[in-house]
Amino acid sequence: MPAEPTQARRFSKARVAQSHALLEDYVELIDDLHAATGEARPTDIARRLGVSHATVIKTIGRLKREGLATSLPYRGVFLTHAGEHLAGKSRARHRLVVAVLTAIGVPPEAAEQDAEGLEHHISPATLRAFSAFLKKGGAGAG
């Protein structure tokens, strides 16, 4: 069993990552909706995430407080520059995790689903190792 401070730090990191993961999922989806349809309405976000409209409204409020999004009445949600940057980072991290999982033989659909959880909890050191792994050709990558 790890020392108490070490274990506490690990659990704290996981809690922060879970909280941040929600914001990352939202900004990535808002960005995707804008790219696909030109708008991101709370109703569409709720349907795509499988949550209630009230949950989306609450989270949009948090995105606004964090400086990641703005909204206009009857016009939906828009990402700020910071929100767009976070969406891009999240999307790149997702693609990297999927690439590694498929390189080691995980079926594409399972890799996509698993990456949804892993991408938010992975350390920068592990991401660098994943990138190096793929650059070296990985386990059957390429």
Image: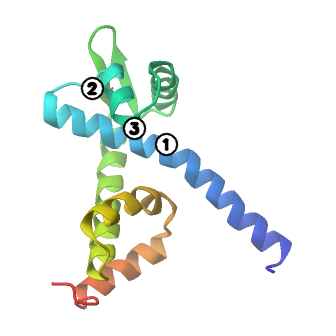
For label 3, the SS is helix
Per the image, the residue denoted by label 1 is: 22
Q: Residue at 37% of width from left, 23% of height from top?
A: 70
Quarter of the image with the N terminus is bottom right
Q: Hey, which quadrant is residue 89 in on the image?
A: bottom left
Q: CA distance from mark 1 to mark 2?
A: 16 Å
Mark 2 element type = loop
Q: Residue at x 81, y 70 (%)?
A: 5
Q: Which mark is residue 40?
A: 2
Q: Nearer the viewer, residue 63 or 137?
A: 137
State yes or no: discs 1 and 3 in contact (Cβ < 8 Å): yes
Mark closer to the chain start, 3 or 2: 3
Who is closer to the viewer here, 15 or 50?
Answer: 50
| Residue 75 picture quarter | top left
Q: What residue did someone put label 3 on? A: 26
Asked if residue 97 shows in the view, the reply is yes
Q: Position of residue 112 (x, y in %)?
A: 31, 60
Q: Is residue 122 left or right of residue 12?
A: left
Q: Residues within 10 Å of mark 1 (few under 14, many from 20)?
A: few
Q: Quadrant of the C terminus?
A: bottom left
Identity, as a three-letter code, of the amino acid under mark 2: Ala
The image's colour scheme reads rainbow
Left or right side of 97 for 1: right
Q: Residue at x 34, y 20 (%)?
A: 43
Q: Is residue 10 left or right of residue 104?
A: right
